[in-house]
Image (cartoon, rainbow, N blue to C red):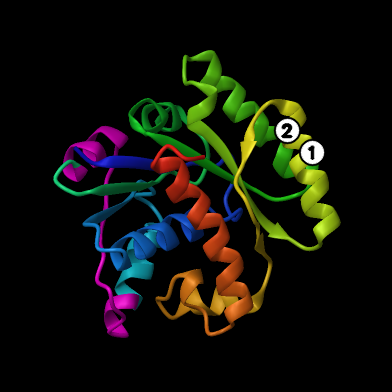
Amino acid sequence: MATVVGFISQKGGVGKSTLARALAREAAVGGLTVKLADLDVQQATSVNWHRRRLDNGIEPRISVEVYKTAAQAIGAGQSFDLLVVDGPGRSSSGSLDIARSADLVVQPTGASLDDLEPAVLVFHELVRHGIPHDRLTFALCRISTEVEEQETRAYLGRAGYAVLNGSIPERPALRQAQNNGFAITETKYRSLAHRADMVLQDIVDRMNGHG
């Protein structure tokens, strides 16, 4: 049975697909069989990214498909070691379906209250429906400074939720990497790749019960 990691968000553009793609790539490099399930049937951004990856001959190859529902994705992913679910662009009833099946739910967020307040409400709603706190964690994305990261961590800590180590900064190089079919861990800038690796390693540790 596959380990399932779900990426959800209340709003688009906060790093959900970015992290889902990177986790799928790192797991594949580590020798796992991986399915990346794109649940955004209208935009299919991860499927389009995968097409660019194939066009540019980038290894390793990753299985990426679009699905209408979490149930379809879960069913299709069971023959893999890891199923990475890239949820819809906005939180919905599908987020609860993902959370009920996932071993870990990651919600990326930026540092502004416009990002943080609705993101916390999403997790509160999942907890209200019976999802355990220890299955939920935030990832910090689009972070500009160390102080901003510290303040964001403190806010989410007061809300009662775990936050992954490290953060993903807002950098043109990371966008360009994805435009060319690479994951953010494959950027040519080592310092940026290292920052992404830190976040992803914490996801792996939590998957393995060490978080």
Q: Residues within 10 Å of mark 2 (few under 14, many from 20)?
A: few
The one nearer the camera, 115 or 140, is: 140
Relative to 92, is 14 above or below?
A: below
The one nearer the camera, 154 or 177, is: 154
Classify residue 207 as left or right of residue 57. Answer: right
Classify residue 108 as left or right of residue 80. Answer: right
Relative to 77, is 201 above or below?
A: below
Name the residue that disc number 1 marks: 154
Q: Position of residue 16 (x, y in %)?
A: 51, 52
Instruction: Check whether the beta carbons of the residues at disc 1 and disc 2 lie within 8 A of each other.
Output: yes
* Label 1: element kind: helix
In this picture, which residue range is highlighted in magenta? 53-77
Q: Position of residue 154 (x, y in %)?
A: 79, 38
How many marks can you see?
A: 2
Look at the image and tell me in which quarter the N terminus lies.
top left
Residue at the spot 46% in from the left edge and 46% down from the top edge: 205
- Is 171 a magenta residue? no
Q: Amino acid at mark 2?
A: Gly
Name the residue that disc number 2 marks: 157
Q: Position of residue 200 (x, y in %)?
A: 49, 56
Classify residue 115 as left or right of residue 46. Answer: right
Residue at the spot 46% in from the left edge and 76% down from the top edge: 186
Residue at the spot 25% in from the left edge and 56% down from the top edge: 34
Instruction: Say which quarter of the image contains residue 73.
Output: top left
Q: Position of residue 75 (x, y in %)?
A: 18, 37
Instruction: Say which quarter of the image contains residue 53.
Output: bottom left
Q: Amino acid at mark 1?
A: Ala
The one nearer the camera, 160 or 123, is: 160
